[in-house]
Amino acid sequence: MEVRINQIRNLLQDKGLDAILLYKPENRRYVSNFTGSTGYVLITKELAQFITDFRYTQQAEAQCKGFEVVEMSKLKPVTDVIKNYSIKKLGIEEDYVAFGQYLEFKEKLENVEFVPLEGTITKLRSIKSQEEINLISKAAEIADEAFQHILQYIKPGLKEREVALELEVFMKKRGASNLSFDSIVASGNRSSLPHGVASDKIIEKGDLVTLDFGCVYQGYCSDMTRSFVMGEATERQKEIYYTVLEAQEKSLQSVRPGIKGVELDKIARDIISDKGFGEYFGHGLGHGVGLEVHELPHVNGLGDVPMEPGMIITIEPGVYIPDYGGVRIEDLVVVTENGYEVLSKSTKELIELKI
Ligand code: ZN
Ligand code: ZN
């Protein structure tokens, strides 16, 4: 983890800090490689410590290369460890530190000034190493296989929940440790809910079905969406599907270093608006994916950061018509030196399941 410890030390320099304390699980894992549930990363110019309790000291010794493991306990909390050093300015994760913990920090570390890190660790995480790209590719591959499996499994009469459970079991059997999020299985009218988590609704012939799901593989997430029809598609279903597909492909083909998230978003949005569906595409085009399923960079109206090689993003336009149904198509994509590489390999041809 030398590289990442050095990245953090550069941050100390840039922000004029004496130390940085991290314990948001994804940031902690990114810097230290620790996969357990309790622990603090403390990095100063001289020190790199991993502070955890008795349950995790052995694990931390094994996982946190380059760190000195320090044991804490109820009687010797993390603030007692921090007090040993002359830290005046301490960077903390203002978007993660709970208010109660902050009050405790202030009380016990009265001479320390707390400085918000303002997402700088999350920014570091937005550019992936080859090893991280490989893990996310593997998570995407498991999701692709699960989609193939579900196309064989799904039939009218099943509940959305049964499809979600089948997805979960399939992915876990293939090595996923978890789901990236509660799988979205939205059929019929419910497919107009952009985040229609699987319900007791029974899937029927003629339904548009949207599956949005992903899994966690060795800490890294995948995320994909496909919509398809239970039977033959109607003209209207086709019109919506091909509009979303065109928006998805045109924005995807524009991914390259230097382009901003807001520009990609506009490419897709203009196509959908030109077809008259503008008011039915109410969310951003995509998001970064990594240790968290939603992370930087922004791929929406806020996306003012130019893309860089190694960023992994989703491209997922959709059209959702209330009381009718919706379509979303989502791929996971790596920004490369020359353009992009798609990690989601499932077909985007309109699928009309034979039932
Ligand atoms: Zn998704
Ligand atoms: Zn997504």
Image (cartoon, rainbow, N blue to C red):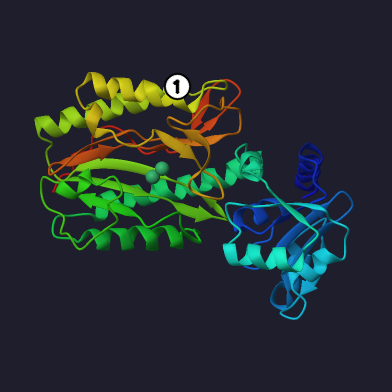
Residue 63 location (% of width, % of height) = 73, 61
186 left or right, relative to 144? left
The amino acid sitting under disc 1 is: Glu
Q: Identify the residue shown where x is 21% and y is 27%.
A: 277
Give the secondary structure at mark 1. helix
Front-lying residue, 319 or 210: 319
Is there any visible trace of residue 69 in the rendered image?
A: no
Residue 312 in view here: yes
Residue visible at 57% across and 47% down? Answer: 135
Q: Quadrant of ligand 2?
A: top left
Residue 308: x, y in percent?
60, 27
Asked which quadrant contains residue 354, the reply is top left
Q: Nearer the viewer, residue 55 or 41?
A: 41
| 254 shown above or below 328 | above
Q: Quadrant of residue 254?
A: top left
Viewer-side residue, 101 vs 212:
101
Residue 259 in the figure: left or right of residue 316: right
**Rendered location of residue 261, percent (x, y):** 48, 28
- Residue at point 27% right, 32% down? 349
Q: Which residue is mark 1?
A: 263
Q: Is residue 253 above or below residue 103?
A: above
Left or right for 62, reference 264: right
Q: Would you say 10 lies left or right of 297 here? A: right
Classify mark 1 as within 8 Å of ligand 2 or not, answering yes or no: no
Label 1: how many Cα within 10 Å (few below 14, some 14–19, many 20+):
some
